[in-house]
Image (cartoon, helix red, strand yellow):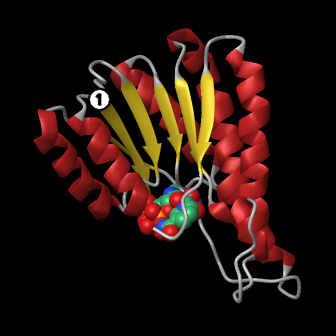
Amino acid sequence: MWFENKVVVVTGASAGIGAETAILFAQQSAKVVLVGRNEDALISVAKKCGEAKGIIPLIVKAELINDNDVKNIVTKTIEKFVHIDVLVNNAGVGFKGGIRDSVDLYDRVIATNVRAVYLLTSLATPYLVQSKGNVVNVSSIAAFKPIKDIEFLQYCMSKAALDQFTRCVALELGREGVRVNSVSPGCT
Ligand SMILES: NC(=O)c1ccc[n+]([C@@H]2O[C@H](COP(=O)([O-])OP(=O)(O)OC[C@H]3O[C@@H](n4cnc5c(N)ncnc54)[C@H](OP(=O)(O)O)[C@@H]3O)[C@@H](O)[C@H]2O)c1
């Protein structure tokens, strides 16, 4: 599988699954856009991506709960690489919490795991339609199986919402040649 001249945006690319995903895409010759907050970590991932095929990734420092930062991801990507072929909505947060916890915790988790995904996908849609591209949402097994022994209510809810978002947008954009899927890891 080759991604030559494909532009791949990966959120949460500074750590964990997102960092490894970005490096794998770079190894497949993709032009990668690395999104995250920790600039040092992003630079370190960019170095590894660059070493793969010599293509220097674009780093976009963004706080995904800030709408202007989210808009900036699309603006900077188009300025630098002209199109978007793949959007990997990977960034996510999970905090221990149950029904006795404040609604602020709910707001915080939903803002990152659902709202930011909605906004970024929406802003990327004209470009994804143009490229007949792909969206990959990183969900979790927690979307359909509550986590035993530890309360993760807000996280489980957010991933269930993300899965339904995936289904609805897959139907909506599938007609225009854009594939929308999710992956649901267990403990990684
Ligand atoms: N690891 C697992 O066991 C597991 C299992 C199932 C599903 N998942 C899902 O897989 C995805 C990645 O998980 P992970 O464990 O690899 O994550 P991680 O190592 O904790 O890294 C999270 C990434 O998301 C970014 N991020 C979080 N909130 C952000 C925000 N508000 N604005 C911008 N960036 C933000 C972080 O950026 P900075 O560090 O730069 O701030 C970081 O790059 C998540 O959606 C998670 O729910 C993980």
Write the residue at 70% across / 77% down.
147
Residue 69 percent location from the top left of the image: 55, 46
Using the rendered image of the protein, determine whether residue 92 is visible from the camera's viewpoint: no
Left or right of 55: which side holds 127? right
Q: Position of residue 167 (x, y in %)?
A: 75, 35
Residue ID for mark 1: 30
The one nearer the camera, 81 or 184, is 184
Q: What's the residue at 73%, 47% (across, down)?
A: 163
Residue 43 in view in this figure: yes
- State the image quarter where residue 53 is shown: top left
How far across and down, in percent of the image, does residue 116 sit?
A: 66, 48
Quadrant where the C terminus lies? bottom left
Which element is circle 1 on? loop
- Residue 170 quadrant: top right
Which residue: 77% across, 21% down? 172
Above or below, comparing residue 1 to residue 154 in the picture: above
The residue carrying pointer 1 sits among few (fewer than 14), some (14 to 19) or many (20 or more) residues within 10 Å by Cα, namely many
- The quarter of the image holding the N terminus is top left
Task: Tell me if residue 134 comes above or below residue 91 in the rendering.
Answer: above
User: In the figure, is residue 106 to the left or right of 80?
Assistant: right
> Looking at the picture, which amino acid does disc 1 mark?
Ala
Residue 157 in the image, given as x and y percentages of width and height: 79, 63
Query: Is 96 positioned to the left or the right of 60 in the image?
Result: right
**Ligand 1 within 8 A of label 1's CB?**
no
